[in-house]
Image (cartoon, rainbow, N blue to C red):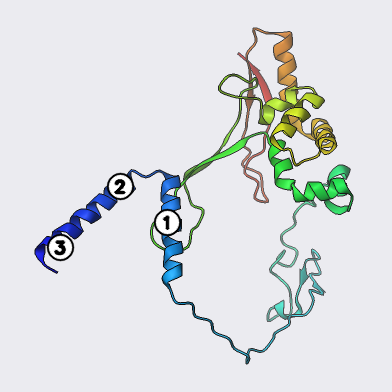
Amino acid sequence: MNLSRAVGYIIRNEQRRTERSQETVQESTIRRRFRNEADNRRRPKRVCIRNDVEEHNCGTMSEQCGFCGAVYWKEEKNTAHKYTKCCHDGKVQLPAFPDAPELLKVLLTENSPDAKNYRQRIREYNSAFAFVSMGAQIKPPRGTGPYCYRLHGQVYHRVTPLYASDQHKESYGQLYIFDSSEATEKRLSNNQNCLQHVFEKLDFMLREINPLAQSYLQMHRLVQEHPTTSVKMVFLEDKNLICGAIMLLLYALIYL
């Protein structure tokens, strides 16, 4: 390579670095995807077919732990012929899960049109009734490897104010201060593939059993009765929580 070509190569590389440093996350993701697709088209496809591979069948998970009832395959016994990967011979005891609301049992297990629609659109239903939205800075890793969902910094949750404004349209926790039918209409406008009467049943259930929904409504009533009073919702962390829970939400009303 002569000197002029080498200099041109260096200049082009510097230009590419400058352009890539100014890319947004979305532009960088799209560029990498196109580059990976082009690389895959150029690579020769190698297919290896083997007929001498023996099939291994672990059987059914018919074995149970004598302490907690966890199920195992027979080959999972340790040298002492025990199953210890669940509760360590009864030394770890977790409280039983609370019974699910009857409505959720029906929607998750039955084969009615309502239940099928709920299971098919379960993410839409979940998002429609969420109290907060997730926020994070997505940062794809460098290199030519497969794409992975990578977050930079801290994952956080966005909580909307109690009342909507020009910057904050009615959504998330704000919908719980509306009448049930009005809240259902607003949710349905953003999730038109869901069913209205299923929305109404889920809204009624959450208003009955969810303390956060009740707290939003209580704050709204306090503001209506005392317009000059400022109300806050406080989240208190409990360090004694176990089972992977991060925080216990204790809802307190503070008057300023």
Measure the C-alpha gap from mark 3 to mark 1. Answer: 27 Å
Quarter where residue 84 is shown: bottom right
Circles 1 and 2: CB atoms closer than 8 Å: no
Q: On the image, which quarter does residue 94 sit in?
A: bottom right
* Disc 3 residue crowd, few under 14, some 14–19, many 20+, Cα 10 Å: few
Q: Is residue 101 visible?
A: no
Callout 3, which amino acid? Arg
Q: Position of residue 222 (x, y in %)?
A: 72, 14
Horizontally, is 81 left or right of 7 in the view? right
- Residue occupying the far bottom of the picture: 52
User: SS of the residue at dot 1?
Assistant: helix
Q: Which residue is mark 3?
A: 5
Report which residue position mark 1 lands on.
32
**Of labels 3 and 1, the one closer to you:** 3
Dot 3 or dot 1, earlier in sequence: 3
Q: Is residue 121 visible from the viewing direction of this image? A: yes
